[in-house]
Amino acid sequence: MIITSQGFGHFTQGLNNQDFGMEMKRMVIVLDGCSGAKCSEIGTRLFAQLFSRKEEAENVEKFEDNVKSVFDDLIEMMKKYYPTQEDLEQEFIMNNLLFTIIACFETETEFIVKMFGDGYIVTQNAYDCISYIKFSYGKYPPYFAYKYCNIENYKDYQFKTFTFDKKAFKKIAIASDGIMPIAKGEVNGLDNCIVDGNVVVVEMGIKNQRQSFYDDVTIATFGGKL
């Protein structure tokens, strides 16, 4: 189940929805484009298309290598259009490839979340308690694309991995940080619908209180109700 909605702030500024979500059989992924990047919505969609074509794209063990492989391919393909490394960085990478990557995999016994950047993990435990786990780096979150730029701060930053045993957790959802109004309790009544993947109710709830969602919001979980 993928739900994505343009933030009210982007709507008033004439900006596209820079988030993108993709659902596969054993993996869901959320890509949250950087608002300060000119064309990050292009980067999120291009990355998702190429990633989905990677061999064993749904294999959690190969996920990080596959992410790197897609970025390697994109950078190598675009090099010839820019005369210098600085031009490549400033005009292509910084404009197109700045986005958070959050992926969730389902195995027989576990949910496994891989995260590079900021966002949310939504959990429903065995007692039906729903919690929001927030990851935030303020105004300057790490992006995988920085590994291809002359930026030292995030060179050594790696994916964070979180494992949730199915004996303790019934459902896991992942979301871009646009879900904050729901997580903070400013928009009520959608918690169970999120983990259940009730697309219609969640979409209507966001639409009815659209002005509360300044940033784009994308939510992904397994299964769902249309």
Image: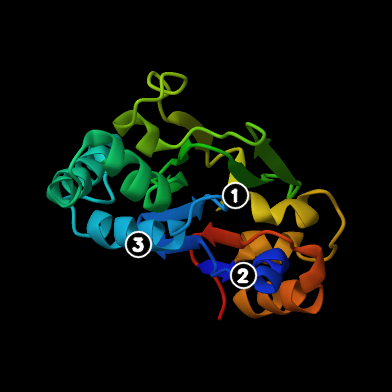
> Is there any visible trace of residue 76 in the rendered image?
yes
Q: Which residue is mark 1?
A: 170
Question: Mark 3 against mark 1, which lies toward the viewer?
Answer: 3
Sequence-first disc among 3 and 1: 3
Q: Secondary structure at mark 3?
A: loop
Tell me which amino acid carries mark 3.
Answer: Met
Q: Residues within 10 Å of mark 3 (few under 14, many from 20)?
A: few
Q: Residue 24's mark?
A: 3
Tell me which amino acid carries mark 2.
Answer: Gln
Q: Position of residue 154 (x, y in %)?
A: 44, 23
Residue 213 lies in quadrant: bottom right
Tell me which amino acid carries mark 1.
Answer: Lys
> Is there any visible trace of residue 60 in the rendered image?
no
Q: Mark 3 to mark 1: distance in Å? A: 19 Å
Question: Mark 1 against mark 2, which lies toward the viewer?
Answer: 2
Q: Mark 3 to mark 2: distance in Å? A: 22 Å
Q: Position of residue 134 (x, y in %)?
A: 68, 38
Q: Is residue 189 left or right of residue 140?
A: right
